[in-house]
């Protein structure tokens, strides 16, 4: 029946206007697990019907809508890649403002799981940024398409403007669909020329799972194509960027305990609350043991229970009454502005067919049921780094929900060809036009940077005399140019 499925979806409560909102709140718990497990949902169950016939294996495109990118002569296109007659992935492509024919192609994915990549487009690093009153947009001089072609993708099916049957509940399943989408995208005559350009994956939040999984899947498919086992277009993956990401829960969950009591801004909760959370982590059968069991060939149920226990007892209570995405402010922080009303007003102009929402609760529920959250993606990240893909991990020091203590512990635990070199490096100040912006390390083709004053969505912030997104733009441009990080 449809009704129980919809009731399960309604268990997810998002806080309107809260920054990012990429990690749903379930029964009052950040990253909680619904008590009712979802059944398979089809588009018709949710009242989502396409206004146009799908074209399985092909794109449907609206070109040069004039929305967001108003720089003269810069090409843009939005629309759908139809995986099947009942599964359509939404994309929005912006050509590089400089040398688009030879510029690299960067894919952007927001997290959740279940959150739209339009968050990144309008709140972070797209050609335009939403105004604080949510009524309009302004041209972004630090857009990531200054020197790269950027492709924003709503995934899995059902997220943002994407629509159709909701089948995906793991990062691996999501990777397969994105590989299929890219085959469709690069087969289209409008975009086929980009297949030879350098390809990058950039992502944040649950992208700590998505990024390593997608990148390693692309590499494995390339190998299968080369061996004649798979038919398809070779994806010229050269770069992986992961911001404020959940990659290795066993490394990262102690970071919540550390950050709650000692961060660059203020304690988030009382000492007694921290002590209680620490006990929940270390006790027999506690969070640490449950994460370990999950990653020791644990079942979906074991991993899902680990997510529920750890987020109920550690992640959520340690946040206190501060915004989990930007701890200097009390909950909720109204910045960046909500984009829901504005983006839905664009639908007819950009070719969108679904009603946009920041996060799809049904997609999130599918992932919560498999326990994908607690599965360790670090081995996949190590595979990507060792394959020669230039990789950057970055984090904002004002973000609690994927804080730098946990992320840096994950990076320190990486086992790659650069491990010894990375451990020998000391943090170096990172400057942008002489302004202090953070601290970083480089080791071979691996870089890490902690950005001062930035919350969960690093490119949405400014620090000192720098403009919004200026530091993130420098980081992006350096890595996309196949260079290590360097101060300016």
Image (cartoon, rainbow, N blue to C red):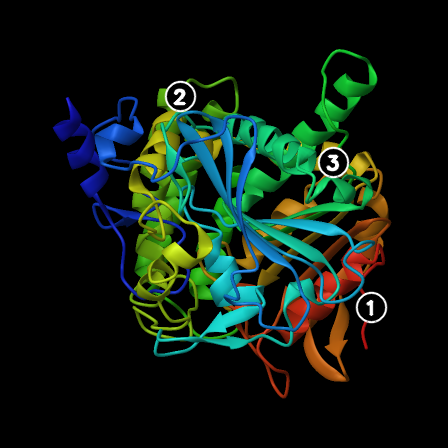
Point out the image quarter for the N terminus.
top left
How far apart are the two marked residues, 1 and 2, measured between alpha carbons? 43 Å
Where residue 92 appears, as percent x and y from the top left, is 54, 52
Q: Which residue is mark 1?
A: 486
Residue closest to the eye, 100 or 285: 100
Q: Secondary structure at mark 1?
A: loop
Where residue 298 appears, as percent x and y from the top left, is 46, 19
Q: Which residue is mark 3?
A: 384
Between tags 2 and 3, which lies in front? 3
Q: Is residue 50 above or below residue 358?
A: above
Horizontal side, residue 293 vs residue 40: left or right? right
Q: Which residue is mark 2?
A: 300
How far apart are the two marked residues, 2 and 3, measured between alpha carbons? 25 Å
Identify which residue is drawn at 60% across, 58% down.
76
Query: In which quarter of the view is residue 309 placed?
Result: top left
Point out the image quarter for the C terminus.
bottom right
Where residue 448 appears, as percent x and y from the top left, is 71, 57
Question: Residue placed farthest to the top in the image?
Answer: 229
Q: Say which label, 2 or 3, has the lower sequence index.
A: 2
Horizontal side, residue 41 vs residue 435: left or right? left
Q: Is residue 92 above or below residue 121?
A: above
Q: Secondary structure at mark 3?
A: helix
- How packed mark 2 is, by other alpha carbons closer than 10 Å (few <14, some 14-19, many 20 or more), is some
How far apart are the two marked residues, 1 and 3, measured between alpha carbons? 22 Å
Identify which residue is drawn at 44% across, 64% down.
261
Identify which residue is drawn at 77% across, 52% down.
104
Query: In which quarter of the view is residue 328 placed?
Result: bottom left
């Amino acid at each position: 029946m449809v009704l129980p499925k919809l009731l399960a979806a309604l268990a997810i409560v998002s806080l309107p206007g809260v920054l990012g909102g990429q990690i749903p709140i379930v029964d009052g718990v950040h990253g909680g697990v619904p008590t009712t497990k979802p059944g398979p949902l089809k588009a018709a169950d949710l009242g989502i019907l396409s206004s146009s016939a799908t074209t399985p294996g092909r794109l449907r495109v609206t070109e040069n809508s004039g929305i967001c990118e108003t720089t003269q002569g810069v090409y843009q296109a939005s629309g759908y890649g139809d995986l099947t007659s009942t599964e359509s992935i939404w994309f929005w492509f912006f050509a590089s403002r400089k040398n688009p024919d030879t510029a690299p192609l960067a894919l952007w994915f927001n997290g959740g799981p279940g959150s739209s990549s339009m968050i990144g487009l309008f709140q972070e690093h797209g050609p335009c940024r939403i105004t604080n009153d949510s009524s309009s947009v302004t041209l972004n001089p630090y857009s990531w398409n200054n020197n790269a072609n950027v492709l924003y993708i709503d995934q899995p099916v059902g997220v943002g403007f994407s629509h159709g049957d909701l089948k995906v509940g793991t990062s691996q399943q999501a990777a397969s669909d994105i590989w299929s989408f890219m085959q469709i995208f690069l087969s289209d005559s409008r975009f086929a020329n980009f297949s030879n350009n350098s390809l990058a994956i950039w992502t944040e939040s649950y992208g700590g799972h998505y990024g390593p999984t997608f990148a390693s899947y692309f590499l494995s498919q390339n190998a299968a194509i080369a061996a004649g086992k798979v038919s398809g277009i070779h994806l010229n993956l050269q770069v992986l960027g992961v911001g404020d990401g959940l990659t290795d829960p066993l490394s990262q969950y102690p970071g919540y305990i550390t950050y709650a009591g000692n961060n660059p801004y203020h304690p988030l909760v009382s000492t007694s609350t921290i002590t209680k959370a620490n006990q929940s982590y270390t006790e027999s059968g506690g969070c640490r043991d449950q994460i370990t069991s999950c990653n020791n060939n644990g079942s979906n149920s074991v991993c899902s229970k680990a997510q529920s226990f750890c987020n109920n007892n550690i992640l959520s209570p340690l946040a206190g009454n501060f915004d989990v995405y930007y701890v200097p402010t009390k909950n909720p922080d109204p910045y960046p502005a909500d984009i829901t009303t504005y983006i839905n007003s664009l639908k007819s102009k950009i070719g969108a067919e679904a009603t946009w929402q920041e996060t799809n609760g049904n997609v999130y529920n599918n992932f919560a049921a498999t326990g994908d959250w607690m599965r360790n993606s670090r081995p996949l990240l190590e595979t990507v780094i060792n394959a020669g893909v230039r990789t950057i991990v970055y984090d904002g020091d004002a973000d609690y929900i994927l804080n730098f203590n946990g992320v840096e512990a994950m990076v320190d635990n990486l086992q790659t060809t650069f491990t010894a070199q990375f451990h020998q490096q000391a943090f170096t100040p990172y400057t942008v036009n002489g302004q202090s912006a953070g601290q970083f390390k480089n080791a071979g083709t691996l870089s890490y940077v902690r950005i001062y004053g930035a919350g969960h969505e690093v490119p949405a912030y400014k620090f000192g005399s720098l403009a919004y997104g200026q530091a993130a733009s420098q980081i992006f441009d350096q890595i996309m140019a196949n260079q290590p990080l360097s101060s300016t």
